[in-house]
Image (cartoon, rainbow, N blue to C red):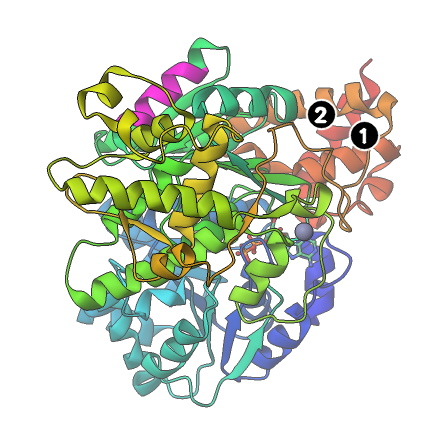
């Protein structure tokens, strides 16, 4: 029998395990249960795929991501691994074929949607064959907070009762301690070894810019840093997804929208184009991307504030799974805070408290003057991280300044307007008053008579908005839910009395960051390799099209780069390149060598 390391080299074409993989694999190969917390892109799949290949029987993988099963199976087949899936999208003939292969022991891996296990016939089918292990992917779906698949996942406790001797491995990229405990409890994994990998994604550059004209800022970001790259843009509403996709397309960037308002075939088409084409941008609401394991997503951009740090980290984690440099970029401004503070006031008490906690953590990340990565990792329970050098605050540390007086000016203006009671005013009016602008609305309400009129000329309008945003973020100011007017909070009084010093960060003029520098630098490519890489890319595109699979199923970018740099002259030499296993060498080796030879 092959050892795990031999399987890694022969089948997957990789030299060595990533941190954590070997121990996890050995635990499962030996028949033990495992609970694996690893960030997106950390390499979770190998943790069950290799044990399934080493142990007798078929590895059964429970995954809710039905739309991706075909691609997962294609990717395994390209490696020469015998894989199949059973889900509701299948023709009966196809299903019977997979079932027969399972029973005959002719599969290495079988992917199942969780709801299949509710059906008795599925359980009976599984009992007719030999199960090597159960892998429970996206295991955070058992947790109580807002997961569609939860009822099906709760059923998975039957696995232990029916198959007491078969090892189970649960995997997730969601790492808060609560979720961790709940997975362990709900799935009855009390005998399991727990593996918590570092959640750091060193190849992702984090950047949060002050928002003024988000569409234009986004375009500038894409043009200067990610021309022709594949990426995801997240926004909150369907209509902005549509508008931004159209705006990008009008400006020469291939982009499509993705949101719940599109019909299913259109959504499926846009998703499959994203997976298959090089360099497509998807502009999506949060509905997009769960489980998308396209490795070469080069950026994730947020033009609206995400609701929680978990959401932000999960979404940004979809960038750079291949370990090559990637950017997580966000534009964030005053209106985001106003809107989210209002949203967070909806619903019952528990819901509101939870929303407020999530929002405060997200805002603290946006407003921090220290390393973003340190804050993120700390949030996920990793307290010992060092400043990373690969985020905007590390690269251009923002100034902190004493904003107490500025805060008092805003708060006393709010206080005076609040006394009028008749009418509610937003930030715009407050800034006009501070700057002493006699607008029609200022004159209409005689606001030029207020003692605060014109007392704030030391700052510009955008600077005042920045101060208001930070006061909102720090809870020193709030919004009234009905009209979004600014109102004081309990904490405001201390500031007005001079008993609370207000520290603010000076917003930086947005300029493109320096090229991302990180410890896990990509295989850097000498200039003369670039045209070869492009030739290999078009060969890969044509081959993928011919075979009806995504391009990355054939070879990843990193593998093509290494080939373009090292220019292997023989199959044997090609076989030593990372990502070229036996099966791919046999299938694509000649094609690669011919492409290299053709000038
Ligand atoms: P996850 O499911 O944790 O998000 P994947 O299992 O999809 O991550 O792995 C991410 C990428 O890393 C994949 O492209 C995979 O082929 C690659 N990978 C995994 N393990 C290794 C390894 N030991 N050496 C090189 N590449 C690896
Ligand atoms: Zn940093």
Q: Main secondary structure of the magenta part?
A: helix
Q: Give the percent coordinates (x, y) of residue 81.
A: 56, 54
Dividing the image into 4 quarters, which one contains the C terminus? top right
Label 1 crowding class (10 Å Cα cut-off): few <14, some 14-19, many 20+?
many
Q: Is mark 1 within 8 Å of ligand 1?
A: no
- Quarter of the picture containing the N terminus is bottom right
In whole angstroms, how far apart are the C-alphas of marks 1 and 2? 8 Å
Which percent across, then down, holds residue 147?
27, 60
Q: Tell whether position 91 is magenta.
A: no
Q: Which residues are magenta?
A: 239-248
- Element assignment for label 1: helix
Q: Is the residue under label 2 in contact with that under label 1 (CB below 8 Å)?
A: yes
Residue bearing the label numbered 2: 536
**On screen, 113 above or below 594?**
below
Q: Secondary structure at mark 2?
A: helix
Q: Quadrant of ligand 1?
A: bottom right
First in sequence: mark 1 or mark 2?
2
Up the image or down, 291 lies above or below 45; here it is above
Residue shown at the point (76%, 22%) measured from the top left? 595
Q: Residue at x 59, y 84 (%)?
A: 30
Where's residue 525, x and y in %?
A: 82, 32
Q: Residue at x 52, y 67 (%)?
A: 380
Q: In the image, is 586 to the left or to the right of 81?
A: right
The disc label shown at residue 564, or none:
1
Q: Residues within 10 Å of mark 2 (few under 14, many from 20)?
A: many
């Amino acid at each position: 029998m092959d050892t795990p390391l031999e399987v890694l080299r022969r089948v997957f074409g990789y030299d060595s395990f990533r941190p954590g993989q070997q121990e996890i694999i050995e635990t499962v190969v030996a028949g033990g249960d495992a609970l694996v917390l690893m960030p997106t892109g950390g390499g979770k799949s190998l943790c069950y795929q290799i044990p399934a290949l080493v142990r007798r029987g078929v590895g059964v993988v429970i995954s809710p991501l039905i739309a991706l099963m075909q691609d997962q199976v294609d990717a395994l087949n390209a490696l020469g691994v015998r894989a199949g899936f059973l889900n509701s999208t299948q023709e009966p003939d196809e299903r019977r074929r997979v079932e027969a292969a399972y029973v005959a022991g002719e599969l290495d891996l079988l992917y199942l949607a969780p709801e299949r296990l509710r059906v008795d016939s599925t359980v009976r089918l599984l009992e007719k064959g030999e199960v090597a292990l159960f892998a429970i992917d996206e295991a955070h779906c058992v947790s109580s907070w807002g997961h569609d698949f939860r009822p099906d996942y709760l059923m998975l406790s039957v696995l232990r009762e029916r198959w007491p001797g078969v090892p189970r491995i649960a995997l997730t990229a969601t790492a808060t301690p609560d979720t961790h405990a709940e997975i362990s409890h709900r799935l009855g994994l009390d005998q399991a070894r727990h593996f918590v990998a570092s959640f750091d994604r060193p190849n992702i550059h984090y950047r949060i810019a002050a928002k003024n004209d988000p569409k234009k800022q986004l375009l500038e970001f894409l043009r200067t840093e990610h021309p022709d790259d594949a990426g995801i843009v997240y926004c909150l509403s369907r209509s902005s997804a549509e508008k931004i996709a159209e705006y990008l397309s009008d400006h020469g960037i291939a982009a499509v929208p993705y949101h719940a308002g599109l019909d299913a075939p259109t959504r499926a088409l846009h998703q499959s184009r994203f997976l298959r084409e090089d360099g497509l941008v998807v502009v999506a609401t949060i509905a997009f991307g769960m489980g998308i394991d396209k490795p070469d997503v080069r950026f994730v951009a947020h033009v609206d504030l995400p609701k929680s740090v978990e959401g932000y980290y999960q979404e940004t984690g979809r960038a750079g799974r291949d370990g090559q440099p990637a950017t997580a970029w966000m534009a964030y401004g005053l209106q985001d805070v106003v809107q989210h503070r209002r949203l967070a006031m909806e619903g019952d008490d528990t819901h509101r408290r939870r929303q407020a906690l999530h929002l405060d953590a997200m805002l603290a990340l946006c407003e921090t003057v220290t390393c973003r990565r340190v804050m993120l990792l700390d949030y996920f329970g990793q307290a010992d991280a060092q400043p990373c050098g690969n985020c905007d605050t590390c690269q251009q540390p923002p100034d902190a300044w004493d904003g107490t007086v500025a805060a008092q000016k805003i708060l006393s203006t709010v206080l005076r307007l609040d006394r009028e009671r008749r009418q509610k005013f937003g930030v715009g009016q407050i800034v006009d008053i501070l700057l002493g602008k006699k607008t029609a609305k200022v004159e209409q309400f005689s606001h030029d008579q207020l003692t605060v009129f014109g007392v704030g000329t030391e700052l510009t309008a955008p600077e005042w908005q920045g101060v208001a945003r930070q006061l909102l973020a720090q809870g020193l100011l709030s919004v009234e839910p009905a009209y979004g007017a600014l109102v004081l909070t309990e904490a405001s009084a201390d500031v007005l009395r001079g008993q609370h010093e207000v520290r603010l960060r000076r917003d930086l003029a947005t300029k493109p960051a320096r090229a991302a520098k990180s410890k896990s630098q990509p295989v850097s490519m000498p200039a003369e390799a670039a045209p070869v890489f492009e030739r290999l890319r078009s060969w890969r595109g044509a081959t993928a099209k011919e075979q009806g699979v995504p391009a990355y199923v054939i070879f990843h970018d990193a593998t093509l780069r290494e080939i373009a740099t090292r220019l292997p002259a023989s199959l044997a030499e090609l076989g030593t390149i990372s990502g070229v296993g036996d099966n791919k060498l046999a299938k694509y080796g000649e094609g690669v060598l011919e492409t290299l030879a053709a000038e």
